[in-house]
Amino acid sequence: MEKRLSLIRRIDNTGVPLLLARLFVGSIFAWLAYNKLLDPIEFLKQTREYHLVPEDPPIFLTLTAVVVPWLELLCAAALILGVYARGAAATLLAMLLFFAPLLLIRAWHLYQDPAGGFATFCAVEFDCGCGTGEVFICAKTLENTALMVGALLALLSRSKRFCLGALITRLRAEKTSSAAFERA
């Protein structure tokens, strides 16, 4: 077991798995946020479909439709750049863990509706409000699972390689130590 753990740590220390996870999750969420921001009214309508936010007063629904895409975009940028990557990964993972089951529940209701006429559960297709238009539930579930794994990897990785945040921290430390050396 120790040998396997050592191998996993060595692979993680290269920084490559973290970089790939950050770029994968960050780019997908940046694209999804961009699509939502392009058509905020449509995203507002899709948000209403889940009946999670009170519609009266409409400010809560509107705030949700405005804040979610910007939060996704901010977290995506943080992940891609490697600045506060763990916090960004944790936020996106929490969002995925919250919204993914809602998609499955909505798809299940559509599947059980005789008017839908879906032959199998994987044939259920609807606009999930994710910013991609209509999706098949099984494909979307696989995508969400891959995003969760990537976000979890970014969250748990010990590596700081290829992260802008680590570079900034190192430069600050060098500046502080050189200033202290000059004073002495």
Image (tube, grey):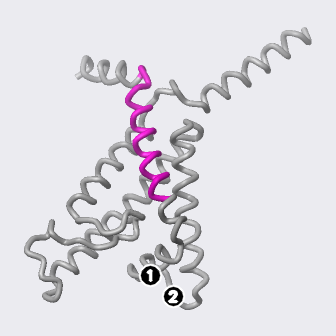
Q: Which of the 4 image quarters holds residue 47?
A: bottom left
Residue at 42% across, 37% down: 156
Q: What secondary structure predominates along the stretch shown in magenta?
A: helix
Mark 2 — residue? 55
Label located before the other in sequence (2 or 1): 1
Mark 1 — residue? 48
Which residue is nearer to you in this view: 118 or 92?
A: 118
The relative height of residue 175 versus residue 41 in the rendered view (above or below) is above
Residue at 84% across, 10% down: 181
Is the residue marked by circle 2 packed among few (<14), some (14-19), or many (20+) residues within 10 Å?
few
Residue at 53% across, 62% down: 69
Label 2 with label 1: CB-CB less than 8 Å: yes
Describe residue 28's horizontal placement relative to residue 112 as left or right: right
Image quarter (top left, top right, bottom left or bottom right) of the N terminus: top left
Q: What is the x, y in percent for residue 124?
A: 19, 72
Q: Check if residue 59 falls in the magenta segment.
A: no
Going by the numbered disc 1, the residue's amino acid type is: Arg
Range drawn in magenta: 13-33
